[in-house]
Image: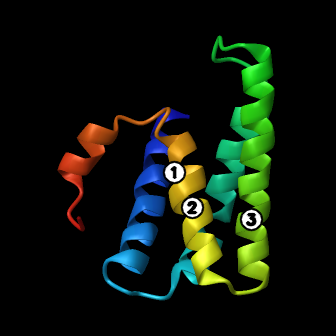
Amino acid sequence: MEETTQKLYKELRNISAFFLIYQLRDNIERTKKIIPEIQKFVFWFLEGNKFGIDEELYQGMSRNLLCILEDILEAMKHKDMVLLHDAITYGLIEYLELFVDVEHEEKEDDYL
């Protein structure tokens, strides 16, 4: 799952950067292409508390992740590029950062 998570993190970060820095307004189309990878990560996270954290904290994080996923789907449904950007950048990416070596990824990123 680690490789899949890193790949998804990098792709979402690029979508976010292209939207914000380069003003490319294709984040909905690019996100649609990676929905299977997003689903895979969400299902993996929701499989159970395999992280050794307090169960109440895990349940709260799980509910929050589902809200982020709802925002992503709502944004795509209504073609709301700003909501999608926010849900990805300030929601899903923050979850992925729990499992990715962010410092390593930033050093290897050609776009930023």
Please tell me which residue is depicted at 72% across the width and 34% down the height of the picture: 61
Instruction: Give the camera-side residue of 72 and 4.
Output: 72
- Whole-Å distance between the Cαs marked 3 and 1? 14 Å
Residue 55, given in percent of the width and then of the height, sits at 78, 16
**Which label's residue is closer to the chain start, 2 or 3?**
3
Q: Secondary structure at mark 1?
A: helix
Circles 2, 1 touching at the beta carbon (< 8 Å): yes
Would residue 67 appear left or right of 5 to someone viewing this image?
right
Residue 76, given in percent of the width and then of the height, sits at 72, 78
- Whole-Å distance between the Cαs marked 2 and 1? 6 Å
- Whole-Å distance between the Cαs marked 2 and 3? 9 Å
Res 83 seen here: yes
Q: Residues within 10 Å of mark 1 (few under 14, many from 20)?
A: many
Name the residue that disc number 2 marks: 88
Q: Residues within 10 Å of mark 2 (few under 14, many from 20)?
A: many
Name the residue that disc number 1 marks: 93
Please tell me which residue is depicted at 58% across the width and 78% down the height of the picture: 82
**Which label's residue is closer to the chain start, 2 or 1?**
2
Would residue 15 appear left or right of 111 to someone viewing this image?
right
Q: Identify which amino acid the numbered label 1 is placed on.
A: Ile
Q: Residues within 10 Å of mark 3 (few under 14, many from 20)?
A: some
Vertical order, 93 against 62 (above or below):
below
Please tell me which residue is depicted at 57% across the width and 61% down the height of the picture: 88
Which part of the image, by quadrant, shows the C terminus?
A: bottom left
Name the residue that disc number 3 marks: 71
Res 47 seen here: no
Please tell me which residue is depicted at 54% across the width and 76% down the height of the picture: 30
